[in-house]
């Protein structure tokens, strides 16, 4: 059955309406909701001008790979936090800017990014460290249907 953890994903960008049913089916497969323990996701509840926030509990490894893949395929930027499981895996934050590769970071159970000292010590200039820290704080645009 695997170790279970929670997930919170914020999705933005523009999605053609013809892909909404496929997206909603992936969301339903993971039983994601618009708030912790709220009603299941309903496409009618999309908020204009805001990114889409989805929450899930008791997910295998705290992962939602089909949602991640869908967002990457359609160029939808996202920030996903996955909780950890003591002795199995740490919490993580995964960022996708709408193109390129996903970036992952170690996180806390409170959804904060954590940077190990070895990573910080790898920078020789403070401005390079600050640039990388800023890159890790991705602002997700509104979720828009075309």
Image (cartoon, rainbow, N blue to C red):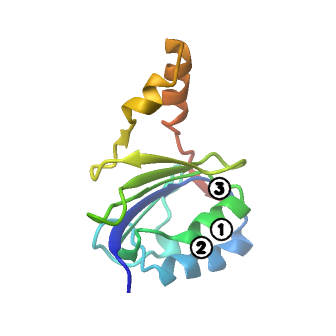
**Percent x, y for residue 111?**
33, 49
**For the point 46% across and 79% down, which residue is it?**
30
Task: Find numbered disc 1 in the image and state the secondary structure of the residue it sits on.
Answer: helix
Spatial separation of the CA atoms under disc 1 and disc 3: 8 Å
Few, some or many residues within 10 Å of mark 1 (<14, 14–19, 20+) = some
Q: Quadrant of residue 72?
A: bottom right
Q: Nearer the viewer, residue 42 or 95?
A: 95
Whether residue 73 sits left or right of residue 50 in the image: it is right
**For the point 59% across and 64% down, which residue is it?**
68
Few, some or many residues within 10 Å of mark 3 (<14, 14–19, 20+) = many
Determine the residue located farthest toward the bottom in the rendered image. Answer: 1
Task: Find numbered disc 2 in the image and state the secondary structure of the residue it sits on.
Answer: helix
Can residue 15 be seen here? The reply is no
**Percent x, y for residue 123?**
52, 21
**For the point 73% across and 74% down, which residue is it?**
18
**For the point 39% across and 78% down, which residue is it?**
40
Few, some or many residues within 10 Å of mark 2 (<14, 14–19, 20+) = some
Residues under numbered marks 1 and 2 in contact, where contact means CB atoms less than 8 Å apart = yes
Whether residue 39 sits left or right of residue 16 in the image: it is left
State the residue position of label 2.
Answer: 66
Q: Nearer the viewer, residue 125 or 101?
A: 125
* Circle nearer the N terminus (1, 3): 1
Can residue 27 be seen here? The reply is yes
Spatial separation of the CA atoms under disc 1 and disc 2: 6 Å
State the residue position of label 3.
Answer: 76
Whether residue 84 sits left or right of residue 69 in the image: it is left
Spatial separation of the CA atoms under disc 3 and disc 2: 13 Å
State the residue position of label 1.
Answer: 70
Q: Is residue 67 above or below residue 77?
A: below
Q: Is residue 73 above or below residue 127?
A: below
**Percent x, y for residue 87?**
28, 64
């Amino acid at each position: 059955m695997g170790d279970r953890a929670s997930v919170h994903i914020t999705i933005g960008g523009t999605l053609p309406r013809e892909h909404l049913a496929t997206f909603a089916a992936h969301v339903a497969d993971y039983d994601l909701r618009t708030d912790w323990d709220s009603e299941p996701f309903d496409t009618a509840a999309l908020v204009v001008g805001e990114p889409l926030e989805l929450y899930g509990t008791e997910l295998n490894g705290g992962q939602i790979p089909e949602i991640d893949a869908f967002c990457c395929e359609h160029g939808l930027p996202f920030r996903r936090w996955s909780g950890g499981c003591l002795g199995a895996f740490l919490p993580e934050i995964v960022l996708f800017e709408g193109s390129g590769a996903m970036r992952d970071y170690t996180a806390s159970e409170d959804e904060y990014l954590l940077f190990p000292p070895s990573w910080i010590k790898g920078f020789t200039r403070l401005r390079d460290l600050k640039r990388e820290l800023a890159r890790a704080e991705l602002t997700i645009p509104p979720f828009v249907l075309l």
